[in-house]
Image (cartoon, rainbow, N blue to C red):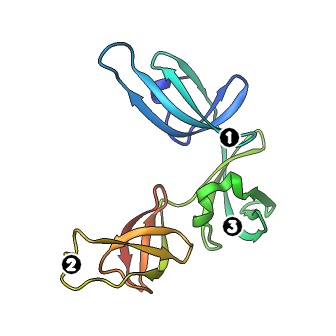
């Protein structure tokens, strides 16, 4: 059991005998009264999201997960097939379960796969990944480089804001936690 103030995004918690993944956390300290922790939690059975508010003095049951390394193999309709790197077993995960993670699936990358009592809980990519820019606007001559960001579409279909000097064909590094541009990578 942990205090509600120790709940973080990505934690798996147990409430009323159901498992939830924390999607959003905000610690609120009003001028008068006790602090609260506002969260958005995803029910891991039906994948619905709901708001939940904890008082700062409440205790929350945090679930310990088993983790293993897996690799993405292929997509079959709405299912994404992964391979356990130790046993070579196939693991099938639904597009709804993966959410925005589908943008970061690549056959050459290893992911951390978390389970609880054999049930999938989540998948984590590396902190940063490299993608090619396939579509972006031309930069405007005379625009200041530091203040100018423009939209770009990447080879993984993700759209990000990039500096003006990035062109089609550029290879860039993306932070997988929030999908933001980090740096240009030399070819």
The spot of residue 103 in percent (x, y) is 58, 66
The residue that mark 1 highlights is 48
- Direction from residue 124 to residue 74 in the image, left or right: right
Name the residue at 45% across, 19% down. 56
Q: Earlier in the sequence, mark 1 or mark 2?
A: 1
Name the residue at 68% across, 65% down. 71
The residue that mark 3 highlights is 72
The spot of residue 122 in percent (x, y) is 65, 49
- Direction from residue 86 to residue 31 in the image, left or right: left
Name the residue at 38% across, 81% down. 137
Image quadrant occupied by the C terminus:
bottom left
Q: Is residue 7 above or below residue 44?
A: above
Residue 25 is tagged as none
Q: Real-space Cα distance between discs 2 and 3?
A: 41 Å
Query: Can residue 3 be seen from the camera position used here?
Result: no
The residue that mark 2 highlights is 143
Q: Residues within 10 Å of mark 3 (few under 14, many from 20)?
A: many
């Amino acid at each position: 059991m942990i205090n509600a103030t120790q709940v973080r995004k990505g934690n798996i918690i147990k409430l009323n005998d159901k498992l939830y993944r924390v999607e959003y956390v905000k610690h609120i300290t009003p001028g008068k009264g006790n602090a609260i922790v506002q969260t958005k939690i995803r029910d891991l059975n039906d994948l619905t999201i709901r708001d939940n508010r904890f008082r700062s003095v409440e205790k929350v049951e945090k679930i310990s997960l088993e983790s293993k390394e897996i690799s993405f193999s292929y997509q079959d309709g709405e299912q994404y097939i992964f391979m356990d790197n130790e046993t070579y077993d196939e693991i099938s995960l639904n597009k709804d379960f993966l959410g925005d993670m589908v943008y970061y699936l690549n056959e050459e990358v290893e992911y951390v796969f978390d389970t609880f009592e054999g049930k999938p809980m989540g998948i984590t990519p590396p902190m940063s990944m490299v993608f090619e820019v396939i579509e972006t606007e031309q930069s405007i001559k005379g625009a200041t480089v530091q203040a100018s960001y423009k939209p770009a579409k990447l080879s993984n279909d993700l759209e990000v804001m990039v500096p003006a000097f990035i062109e089609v064909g550029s290879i860039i590094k993306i932070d997988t936690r929030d999908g933001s541009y980090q740096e240009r990578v030399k070819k």
